[in-house]
Image: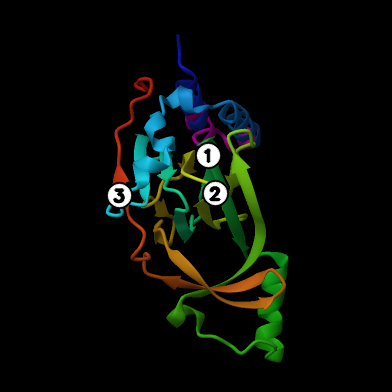
């Protein structure tokens, strides 16, 4: 019998390889089946739920489990230590779905090129309301804070798309946490006329109006690194 996680993967492949007129329907179907996913479906090791597992200060703050990758999508599990986080980072022209399978996380999401950020840019350069910035040299973007939500295994999957919530950070709350992550297309795949999709990290530079911020691109934070753990769930070979 086909496992649940295999069905999730099959729907993800269908979603991100389908004809455009079916995309919205397939994306909704993927979110629905992902919503039913549990830790048991991927044979999630319960030792990762124990705070004592993370007592070693030399241990990486995030553990990564690679489930599946092709040229259209990736499916992985991220495990965050207590009070751990994925730094503020982007997803260039990508879709992403997150389903918590253990613990609780806080997701803080920003969008670029919203009505408010574009209006601010027009006003800034026309009226000098905000001092002009050499954005290219300093790699600064203007982003609107869209949401800051706490989710757990009972929550619906969280979705980002090429135009919405495309920069975010994720923090574990009240202990370790784990979530299933689907991204499409994967990082390093080509953006037409723009080159590969690279993951950039950001720091909040300034708050220039309510819920609108300047974010500055930074190097990957020194406190952030990952180790890996093998996938031990049901076989996903087709």
**Which label was assigned to residue 56?**
3
In primary-sequence order, the first of circles 1 and 2 is 1
Q: Earlier in the sequence, mark 3 or mark 2?
A: 3
Decide whether the magenta segment is chiefly helix, strand or loop.
Answer: helix
| Of pointers 3 and 1, the one earlier in the residue sequence | 3
Q: Badge 2 local density, few (<14 within 10 Å), some, or many (20+)?
A: many
Mark nearest the camera among 3 and 2 is 3
Q: Which residue is mark 1?
A: 103
Q: Residue furthest top?
A: 1
User: In the picture, residue 209 is in which quadrant?
Assistant: bottom right
Seen from the viewer's position, the closer of residues 208 and 74 is 208
* Residue 67 versus residue 108 in the image, above or below: above
* Residue 163 rendering spot, x and y as whole percentages: 61, 55
Which x, y percent locates residue 81? 42, 48
Q: Position of residue 139 (x, y in %)?
A: 46, 75
Residue that numbered label 2 is attached to: 173
Q: Is residue 18 on the magenta stretch?
A: yes
* Secondary structure type for disc 2: loop
The residues colored magenta run 13-23
Mark 3 and mark 2 residues within 8 Å of each other at the beta carbon: no
Describe the element under mark 1 as helix, strand or loop: loop
Quadrant location of the C terminus in the rendered image: top left
Q: Is residue 24 left or right of residue 93?
A: right
């Amino acid at each position: 019998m086909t496992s649940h996680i295999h069905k999730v993967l099959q729907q993800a492949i269908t979603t991100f390889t389908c004809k455009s007129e079916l995309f919205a329907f397939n994306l909704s179907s993927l979110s629905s089946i992902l919503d039913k996913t549990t830790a048991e479906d991927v044979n999630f090791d319960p030792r990762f739920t124990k705070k004592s597992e993370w007592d070693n200060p030399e241990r990486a703050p995030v553990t990564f489990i690679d489930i599946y990758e092709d040229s259209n999508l990736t499916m992985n599990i991220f495990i965050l230590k207590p009070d751990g986080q994925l730094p503020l980072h982007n997803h260039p022209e990508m879709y992403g779905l997150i389903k918590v399978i253990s613990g609780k996380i806080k997701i803080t999401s920003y969008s670029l090129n919203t009505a408010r950020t574009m209006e601010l840019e027009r006003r800034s350069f026309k009226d000098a309301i905000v001092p002009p910035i050499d954005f290219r040299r300093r790699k600064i973007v203007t982003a609107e804070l869209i949401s800051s939500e706490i989710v757990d295994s009972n929550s619906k999957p969280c979705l980002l798309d090429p135009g919405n919530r495309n920069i975010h950070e994720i923090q574990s709350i009240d202990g370790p946490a784990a979530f299933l992550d689907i991204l499409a297309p994967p990082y390093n795949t080509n953006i037409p006329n723009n080159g590969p999709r690279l993951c950039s990290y950001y720091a909040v530079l300034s708050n220039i109006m309510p819920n609108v911020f300047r974010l500055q691109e930074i190097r990957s934070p020194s406190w952030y690194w990952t180790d890996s753990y093998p996938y031990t769930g049901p076989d996903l070979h087709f």
